[in-house]
Image: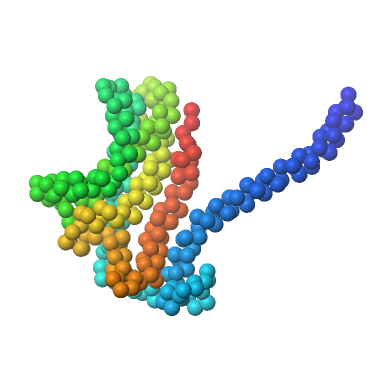
Amino acid sequence: MSGVRATADRAGTRRAPGRFRLRRPWRLAAEAGALLIAATVAFPLYWMVLSAFKPAGEVQSTRPLPWTLDPSLDAFRRVFQQQDFGRYFLNSLFVAGVVVVVSALIAFLAATAVTRFRFRFRTTLLVMFLVAQMVPVEALTIPLFFLLRDVGTAVPGIGLNTLGALILPHLAFSLPFAIWMLRGFVRAVPAAVEEAAAIDGASRARFLWQILFPLVFPGLVATSVFSFISTWNDFLFAKSFIISATENSTLPMAMLVFFKPDENDWGGIMAASTVMTIPVLVFFVLVQRRLVSGLGGAVKD
């Protein structure tokens, strides 16, 4: 009996290299395809950073090269020497930070409410969340302009030419997606967890913040990334709602200085774009692990 088993083991050992040779080309093809896609996605970022470090003559050359032998920081000097550039940076950081924190808290409470409680028009409310995501932002810009103008006369601080005029619209557009995504994370937490917490004497508020909140935190991170990116890169609302109070402008508005009627300063544009990309990369690095687990569905029964 042992001899038969040994013979089978040797046969399996002899067949293993054949299976490996059959799978290896497919694996190499998949890896090559992944590298090709990654290079295609990363090439625009590489070209942006490269153009930011190129001298003006190389940037405007009719035969651009994918490298430079004479890197220069002149474009970055022009960016940081721009008047109020630091203020624009802080304005963008403040608006994006407020939107991320407030939308995460509201979305968490709203997702818990529509998942754990039964009430009238609950399904209708969820459908409205989806419909809100289908409406183009450009179609709502003009109505939002008049709404903020009228609200600003009654409530100072959130009207036109204020940072509140940028925070409120981004909250309105971030919440439907965040609520719909967090709804799946809250639903994935078994009801038995809440029942066990209640048996142990935990109140509903304690269960909400000390048990449920840590479990759905990866989902909050994933939604926060999308909220941060959309708010940080916003140009339409900043251009439409900040009219005369230039001190309340955000970083994308600072790039308009480099667009000139006669000739655009492409080196300055690429340098400013590189500076704008750094906070997003830092944010990604800080939340990378939570983001991966959030997108993959970290909460399990």
Residue shown at 81% from the left, 34% from the top? 12
- Above or below, comparing residue 25 to residue 254 in the picture: above
Residue shown at 43% from the left, 25% from the top? 190
Residue shown at 9% from the left, 46% from the top? 154
Residue 92, percent from left and from top? 29, 57
Residue shown at 47% from the left, 49% from the top? 288
Residue 120, percent from left and from top? 26, 22
Indicate the quadrant containing the N terminus: top left, top right, bottom left or bottom right.
top right
- Above or below, comparing residue 208 to residue 253 in the picture: above
Residue 286, percent from left and from top? 43, 52
Where residue 121 sits, quadrant-wise, is top left
- Above or below, comparing residue 194 to residue 282 in the picture: above
Where residue 85 sits, quadrant-wise, is bottom left
- Residue 202 visible, this angle: no
- Residue 67 visible, this angle: yes
Nearest the viewer among 47 and 163 is 47
